[in-house]
Amino acid sequence: MKTDRTHKNWFQEAKYGLFIHWGLYAMMGGVFNGRKVPYGAEWIMKNAEIPLAEYRKLQEKFLPVNFNADSWIRQAAQWGMKYVVFTAKHHDGFAMYDSKVSDYNIMHTPFGRDVTKELAEACQKYGLTFCVYYSQMQDWENENGWGNTWDFGEDEKKDFKKYFYEKVKPQVKELLVNYGKIGLIWFDTPYTMPKALCRELKDWVKQWQPECLVNGRIGYGLGDYRQMSDNEIPVLAFPRPWETPVTLNETWGYSSVDENWKTPREVIEKLADVAGKGGNLLLNIGPDGTGNIPEGSIKVLDEVGGWLKENGESIYATEAVPDFAYQIRWGRLTMRPGRLYLHVFRYPGFPHEIMLAGLMTKVRRVYILGTGQELTFFQSYEIARDEYRFRVILPPESAEERDLVVCAEVEGPVVPHELV
Ligand code: GLC
């Protein structure tokens, strides 16, 4: 991937995407035999060691009458997301699309609709980039896939290559040739997969769609961009493109017993934090077994979407901010050429002033991004400390704002004094 600052691709500009974890597991909602099974609800088959023969029965019952690709994606667009990553096949091995490779797929359910196709078309309609998640190593349905030791015995004794050539490559090809342009393919948990196979898989993707990006969990740093761990945001800005997948509660797949939602404010803070470090935030929803998106997530995403309508300029297509040595106690920075955005998460007490130490760049004008209200500011050089200071006086009435974004128009590149 080009990291040249002047040639950003769609991924680096997008900043905010929707992750959708949806599969047979959604019908269980994280509960098995009346007990909540700990950890991700999409892992329920493995975590409760449900025999394949029993888990398969979900396939016979899958009828998500409330599923509506158009409404999911229309909402994603309103929420301000620029791309969608859908779990075409998660670790349970069940394909949520029309696969000729294995009958363990959505066409062989009472629902019988190719939801992947419907989602891809809806993305096209609303101008979002459609992307797929594919679990390449773990597959709890295939006797040679990794992970299902309770039905098939030790993983190390399996013929992984057989699974790789008979299921993974043909299925990945199906996804890349039958669903139009795929923005990126999101692999996961490569565990001990040999490097040669990881490379082969990446080449395979490029063979069918040369522009399709491959995420970092292909393994061995072979991805086109770096994939952070789940819910992990790095401390410093990153020079290469990267992405953090984030849950809205404690799980990826739908859980009927997890209402521990992040607040809109937390999500906005993460978004600004990630954008300021040059990355993307991939925020997850786990629709339930009927196809409904949980109310708890909708509420949060609606609010974040509302904030983005006013303040999107401070997030989309921004670039990593060089590191300032001193802690910025009141919030975060994002930027684009000619503009530095100050995200005020912790509103300062009287005299309502925020300060950025180390900014050498000349500031021309400062205003509130959402309203255009001009703000008073000062730039000074403190002789004793050898320190450049940029101070902005905030209006007291903004104290209630969720994330007040102050825009500073700057002359030339943002240069922290410590880096000179
Ligand atoms: C994990 C989990 C998985 C989830 C993913 C999202 O590695 O195995 O269930 O899909 O992270 O980032």
Image: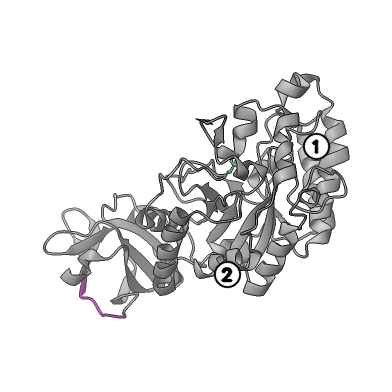
Q: Judge depth for marks 2 and 1 and give the one in front.
A: 2
Q: Nearer the viewer, residue 184 or 44?
A: 44
Mark 2 sits on what residue?
A: 74
Q: Residue at x 52, y 33 (%)?
A: 39
- Magenta stretch containing residue 179, yes or no? no
Q: How would you rate the neighbour count of disc 1 (Cα within 10 Å): few for under 14, some for 14-19, many for 20 or more?
A: some
x, y (%) of residue 157?
Answer: 80, 19
Helix, strand or loop at disc 1?
A: helix
Mark carried by residue 139: none
Helix, strand or loop at disc 2?
A: helix
Looking at the rendering, the stretch of residues picked out in magenta corresponds to 372-377
Q: Can residue 203 be seen from the camera position used here?
A: yes
Q: Residue at x 61, y 55 (%)?
A: 291
The quadrant where ligand 1 appears is top right
Residue 347: quadrant of the picture: bottom left
Q: Can residue 8 be seen from the camera position used here?
A: no
Q: How would you rate the neighbour count of disc 2 (Cα within 10 Å): few for under 14, some for 14-19, many for 20 or more?
A: some
Mark carried by residue 197: 1
x, y (%) of residue 245?
Answer: 54, 48
Magenta segment's dominant SS is loop
